[in-house]
Image: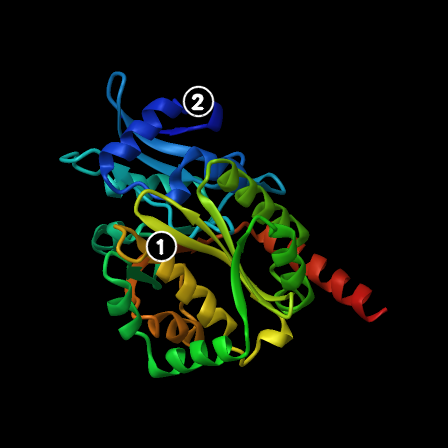
Amino acid sequence: MLRLLKNKEINIALYEKCLEESGNCSLYTTPAHLDIVSPNWKAIVWQEQEKYLMVMPIPEISKMGLKLIIQPFFTQQLGIFHIPGFPLPIKKVLSLLANKYPFVHYQFSSKNLPLIEENLEGFSLKKRTNYILDLNKPCEDLQKAYSSNHKRNIRKAEKNNIVISKSNDISTLIDIFKQNQGKKIKEVKAKNYVLVEKLFEHASSRGIGNIYLAKKEEEVIAGIMTIHSKSRIHYIFGTTSPAARESGAMQLIFNKLIQDYAGTPVFLDFEGSDIKGIARFFASFGALPEYYPAIYKERMPLWFSLLLKVKKWLYSLKATA
C-alpha cells in the first residue's frame, strides 16, 4: 500500500533496511543527513506487513500555510529506492505529488532517470549533470587523465610553495566563503552556513568528514569539505580567496585528495555542474558526466503569488530608502 508518512510515523529501521536492500543508497537519503537539511522530512513508502518495499524521502516545508517540496541545500539527489524485483508504482507516486503539492522542485537519483523520463506527467523535467571520477585505479593513471591546463596549474601551485593539509576547521572555510562567494550569491543565507557546520560536525564525529586546506605562507587561501558514503566521496562545500585565483590551489587540493584515495573502490563525486566553467573544471580531472532528473511544478494559488509580489515591492522600497 502506498502511503505518505509524517516524520514521526516513519519506521527508521524499515526505511534504512529498504535503502540498504536497494543497492542504491546515497548519503543524501540517510535519516541522519535528512534530519539536518530537512528536519520535517516525510517519506512515501510502499509497505507490506512489516517491510518497506519502496521508500522516497520527501523534503517538505511549510510556507504561509502551504505545503511545498523544495530540494534542500547540500542534497543533490534524492529519489525512489526499492527492493530488487519490486514493480515500482511510479505513476501513482507522481500523481500523489502532483495532487498534494502546488509547488515541487525535486531531484531524483541518476538511477531513476529512465523511469522518470518514461512516466513523467504533470511536471516539467530537466536533465541535470553531475561529474564522477572512479578512483579505483593507480594514481599515475588517474593523473595522466588530467587536462594539460590542470597539470600546468598543479606545477604552478607547487612552485609557489602552496601546501595542502587536512583539518577540522570548518569555520575558516565558512569565513572565506562569506567574505568572497557569499557576497555574490543571494540565495546563500545565514542558515545555510549553519547547515554546513552541522553536516561537518556530524560527519566528523563518525569519521567520514574531511577538510582539505591550501595554505600559502601560513594563510589559508582555498579549501574543500568532503563527506564519505559507502561508495563515494562527496564534494560538499568549497571556497577560494582572491589570493587563490590563478594560483592552482584548487587543482592542487583535488590532486591531493585523488592521491589519498587512488586505488580504492570509491568514486569522487564532484556534485555538479550545469555551469559550463565548473563542469569543465571537474571534467579536466578525467571525471565523466552522470545525469539525473529534476522535476518541477509551480501552480501556486493566486493569493500567494500576489502576496509575494507585494513583499518584493516592499523590499525594493526599503532597499532604495
Image x and y of residue 232, in percent:
34, 50
Q: In this view, does 191 lie above or below 253?
A: above
* Residue 54 shows in the view: no
Which of the image's four quarters has the N terminus?
A: top left
Residue furthest to the right: 321
Image x and y of residue 72, in percent:
50, 48
> What is the number of the mark on residue 9?
2
Q: Which of 32 and 227 is in front in this view?
A: 227
Q: Is residue 24 above or below residue 313?
A: above
Name the image colouring. rainbow
Which of the image's four quarters has the C terminus?
A: bottom right
Q: Is residue 305 left or right of residue 258?
A: right
Q: Residue at x 53, y 43 (%)?
A: 199
Q: Which of marks 2 and 1 is nearer the N terminus?
A: 2
Label 2 secondary element:
helix
Mark 1: amino acid: Phe
Dot 1: few (<14), some (14–19), or many (≥20) neighbours within 10 Å?
Answer: some
Q: Is residue 295 above or below residue 79?
A: below
Q: In this view, does 85 lie above or below 165?
A: above
How far separated are the C-alphas under marks 2 and 1?
Answer: 28 Å
Label 1 secondary element:
loop
Image x and y of residue 286, in percent:
29, 70
Q: Which residue is drawn at 21% across and 33% down?
A: 83
Mark 2: amino acid: Glu
Q: Is residue 209 left or right of residue 111?
A: right
Q: Which residue is drawn at 63% across and 75% down?
A: 242
Image x and y of residue 293, in percent:
32, 56
Q: Which of 186 and 142 is in front in this view?
A: 142
Which of the 4 image quarters holds residue 57?
top left
| Circle 1 residue | 123
Q: Which of 299 and 294 is in front in this view?
A: 294
User: Which numbered disc, 2 or 1, marks the residue closer to the eye?
Assistant: 2
